[in-house]
Image (cartoon, rainbow, N blue to C red):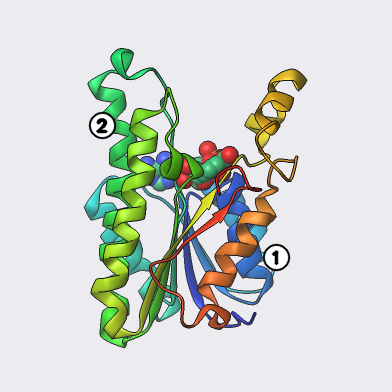
Amino acid sequence: MDFKGKNIIVTGATRGIGLTIAEAFAKQGANVAICGTREDAVNKAAENLAAFGGKVLGRAVNISRAQECDAFVADVVKEFGSLDVLVNNAGITKDNLAVRMTEEDWRAVIDVNLTGTFFMSKAALKVMFKKRAGNVVNISSVVGEMGNAGQANYVASKAGIIGLTKTLAKEFGSRNIRVNAVAPGFVRTAMTDALPQDVKEKALENVPLKRFAETQDIAKAVLFLASEDASYITGHILSVNGGLYI
Ligand SMILES: NC(=O)c1ccc[n+]([C@@H]2O[C@H](COP(=O)([O-])OP(=O)(O)OC[C@H]3O[C@@H](n4cnc5c(N)ncnc54)[C@H](O)[C@@H]3O)[C@@H](O)[C@H]2O)c1
């Protein structure tokens, strides 16, 4: 896969899955723009990404605000000259059973995960539309496909991303713009590492591959969908879940 000189945005790339995706693009010679909520974390991640040799731009952006998304995309186009790939990775959880879930927590998760993905896509697609080329990869979740007790807000946001992905694929296909999503299962992160052994074993009972995904497993799927190897794939939801949901 060759992303040399390509201009990429990865949202929520200060750590976890987003950072691994940003690194994977940077290793392939891409110019990478990242955002996150905390300026210090964005700057640190951007510094590390610069070691791969491409251009790097980091911004503290709240993707649930349309104006901040527009300004971020405008900055990227100004600095890099263009935009080829948007990866909508930023996401949050605020779990609770539906009857105990506050309106505030419902809205917060929908605002970041779903509305933020829409705002970033809208800003990026305007640029891609003009150049009649581009690529969007959204990060959904296995729970958006199968549901999960205690996560009504998160599941609704991730299922919403699936609908958004399919709709944008239909709206922008004629402009040579592909829009796909990756739906990860359990991913090994600092959060899942901290779980007690018995909880981890229980979670893995329903995973045929008997391990959590590494963040690289998710990044590989994202780079595939963004690459020319996937040139006839659009509107697809690529499950990367070890067989948890088939
Ligand atoms: N970790 C998993 O097991 C798992 C499984 C399935 C899907 N996912 C999805 O993968 C994505 C990344 O997950 P992770 O575990 O690496 O997350 P994480 O919590 O480690 O990192 C989240 C990133 O998003 C950024 N962010 C949060 N709110 C933001 C906002 N309003 N504006 C801009 N940036 C914001 C944070 O700054 C951070 O960089 C999320 O969309 C998540 O829902 C994760």
Task: Please name the amino acid that badge 1 sits on.
Answer: Ala
Q: Quadrant of residue 200?
A: top right
- Mark 1 surroundings within 10 Å by alpha-carbon count, few (fewer than 14), some (14 through 19), many (20 or more): few
Q: Could you say which is closer to the camera, residue 206 or residue 103?
A: 206
Q: Quadrant of residue 190?
A: top right
Query: Residue at the spot x=70%, y=33% of the render?
Result: 204
Query: Residue at the spot x=45%, y=30% of the render?
Result: 148
Residue 76 appears at what percent x and percent y?
Answer: 40, 69
Residue 190, visible in the rendered structure: yes
Q: What mark, if any, has residue 51 been given in the picture? A: 1
- Confirm if mark 1 falls within 8 A of ligand 1: no
* Residue behind mark 2: 107
- Mark 2 surroundings within 10 Å by alpha-carbon count, few (fewer than 14), some (14 through 19), many (20 or more): few
Residue 14 appears at what percent x and percent y?
Answer: 56, 47
SS assignment at label 1: loop
Residue 107 appears at what percent x and percent y?
Answer: 25, 31
Q: Could you say which is closer to the camera, residue 37 or residue 239?
A: 239
